[in-house]
């Protein structure tokens, strides 16, 4: 990039041949296209006009967004003091610029011409070329200066368009960031709603248990049994609240997954669900699933979700079967009911968060929680249902590879 040099270059007197015009333009356009900033382009123009076109001095003016003019680059034989007399206050058009330059040109003892820097109807500024009357410029020299000015304007327009595109891109990135943040908040909202949902599932039966305790006052064994059950439910409730802390941790290694016996999970979930059964029959058909690595609180919550859905579907009468077993190198638990089942259009949407057919009494989160739970632990959720033929929800999880080395913790802590 050429630097500004004051008063060091004199007029170039030789006649410019067409060849020189072309080669200057080509060289200039190469230099300009290498220049990445508008400032670089302005000073290149000022310097080339003096050094290659025999001007005495050249000044490049730029226009701001408000339309006023400012000196951006200056090159040639004028000294800085002479240039400082140029008054650009209230100069907002090419005509006003011409008048302002004319006012001081007499002092300088030079004639001048103004070349606007215009491309696609956008004015980027102007080039003012000072020359001595005693050394008039040839037509070819003026043509060359015109060509340089046009090339400069094209290049400035390119830079301007590039900046506009860059700004549009930056704006887009900012709005994308905002969108991601909104998504995170949405996920946070979903998680809070999910936890509230699970806590409600746990706490409502607890309230029924306190009623039972009151009724059983005096019967020591029953009270002990009930308080033990409440203790277990409360433990699960606390673990559910713990999930808030797991929000940023997603893999099974990070969410305190432990070797777990599915049958004991079923027994806990059944116990929690019992108060809601009413006349509905609940039949456990427990097989011998292998030990799997999951988070017990989440597993109990998932089975409770499936049981409550079955209870809702049965509307007070029917049978729920809870099955466990081993298949495909893993263990599974299934909740089946002989209720109304689901139409295909409902079936296709039930995993969507907030999809519910229960109006205000549903949250539409139960099954999305169950699905997320199976995914988090490398398992899967299989759903079978036909209208009029009940529904079956089966959670499958891979078995722990070296089972012998690990004891399932949950069954020993809460024997069924
Ligand atoms: N066992 C079932 N039988 C029939 N439909 C069911 C069953 N389980 C779930 N569904 C359907 O799936 C929907 C979504 O269930 P879920 O995500 O648990 O939310 P919610 O129970 O709050 O509605 C339910 O509203 C219901 O339409
Ligand atoms: Mg539900």
Image (cartoon, grey):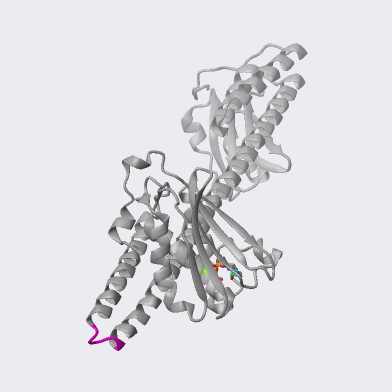
Q: x%, y% of residue 396?
A: 51, 51
Q: Is the magenta stretch mostly helix, strand or loop?
A: loop
Ligand 1: give its quadrant. bottom right
Q: In this view, does 197 lie above or below 51?
A: below
For the point 60% across and 38% down, which residue is it? Answer: 101
Q: Which of 343 and 229 is in front in this view?
A: 229
The residue stretch that appears in magenta: 215-219
When the figure is inspected, residue 200 is found, relative to residue 107, above or below; the finding is below
Image-quadrant location for residue 144: top right
Q: Residue 54 is drawn in which quadrant?
A: top right
Q: In this view, does 264 lie to the left or right of 99?
A: left
> If the image is split into quadrants, where does the C terminus sit?
bottom left
The answer to whether one can see residue 114 in this image is no
Give the tally of numbered discs: 0
In the image, residue 26 sits, relative to residue 206, either above or below, namely above
Q: Which of 344 and 318 is in front in this view?
A: 318
Q: In this view, does 179 lie to the left or right of 210?
A: right
Image location (x, y in percent) of residue 211 = 33, 85
Residue toward you, 154 or 61: 154
Residue 171: say if magenta.
no
Would you say residue 294 is visible in this rendering?
yes
Choose between 162 and 77: the one closer to the eye: 162
**147 relative position to 97: left or right:** right
Residue at (68%, 11%) from the top-left corner?
14
Name the spot of residue 321 as percent of width and height, x first.
53, 66
At horizontal 59% and vertical 40% (from top left) the residue drawn is 163
């Amino acid at each position: 990039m050429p630097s500004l040099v004051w008063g060091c270059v004199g007029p170039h007197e030789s006649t410019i041949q067409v060849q020189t015009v072309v080669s200057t333009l080509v060289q200039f356009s190469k230099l300009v296209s290498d220049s990445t900033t508008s400032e670089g382009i302005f000073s290149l123009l000022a310097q080339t006009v003096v050094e290659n076109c025999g001007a005495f001095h050249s000044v490049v003016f730029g226009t701001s967004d408000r339309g006023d003019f400012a000196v951006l680059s200056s090159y040639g034989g004028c000294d800085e003091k002479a240039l400082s007399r140029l008054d650009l206050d209230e100069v907002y058009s090419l005509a006003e610029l011409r008048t302002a330059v004319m006012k001081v040109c007499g002092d300088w003892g030079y004639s001048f011409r103004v070349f606007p820097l215009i491309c696609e109807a956008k004015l980027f500024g102007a080039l003012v070329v000072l020359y001595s009357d005693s050394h008039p410029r040839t037509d070819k020299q003026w043509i060359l200066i015109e060509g340089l000015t046009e090339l400069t304007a094209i290049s400035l327009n390119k830079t301007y368009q590039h900046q506009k595109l860059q700004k549009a891109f930056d704006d887009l990135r900012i709005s994308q960031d905002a969108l991601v943040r909104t998504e995170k908040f949405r996920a946070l909202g979903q998680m809070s709603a999910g936890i509230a949902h699970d806590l409600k599932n746990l706490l409502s039966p607890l309230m029924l248990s306190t009623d039972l305790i009151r009724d059983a006052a005096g019967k020591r064994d029953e009270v002990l049994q009930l308080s033990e059950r409440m203790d277990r439910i409360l433990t699960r409730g606390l673990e559910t609240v713990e999930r808030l802390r797991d929000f940023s941790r997603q893999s099974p290694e990070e969410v305190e997954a432990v070797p777990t016996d599915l049958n004991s999970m079923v027994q806990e979930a059944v116990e929690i669900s019992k108060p809601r059964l009413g006349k509905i029959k609940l039949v456990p058909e427990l097989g011998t699933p292998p030990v799997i690595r999951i988070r017990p609180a989440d597993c109990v919550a998932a089975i409770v979700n499936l049981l409550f859905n079955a209870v809702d579907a049965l509307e007070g009468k029917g049978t729920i079967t809870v099955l466990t077993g081993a298949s495909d190198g893993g263990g599974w638990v299934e909740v089946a009911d002989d209720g109304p089942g689901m139409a295909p259009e409902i079936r296709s949407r039930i995993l969507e968060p907030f999809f519910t057919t229960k109006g205000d009494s549903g949250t539409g989160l139960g099954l999305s929680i169950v699905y997320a739970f199976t995914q988090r632990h490398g398992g899967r959720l299989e759903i079978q249902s036909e209208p009029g033929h009940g529904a079956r929800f089966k959670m499958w999880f891979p078995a722990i590879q070296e089972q012998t080395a690990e004891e399932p913790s949950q069954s020993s802590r809460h024997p069924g």
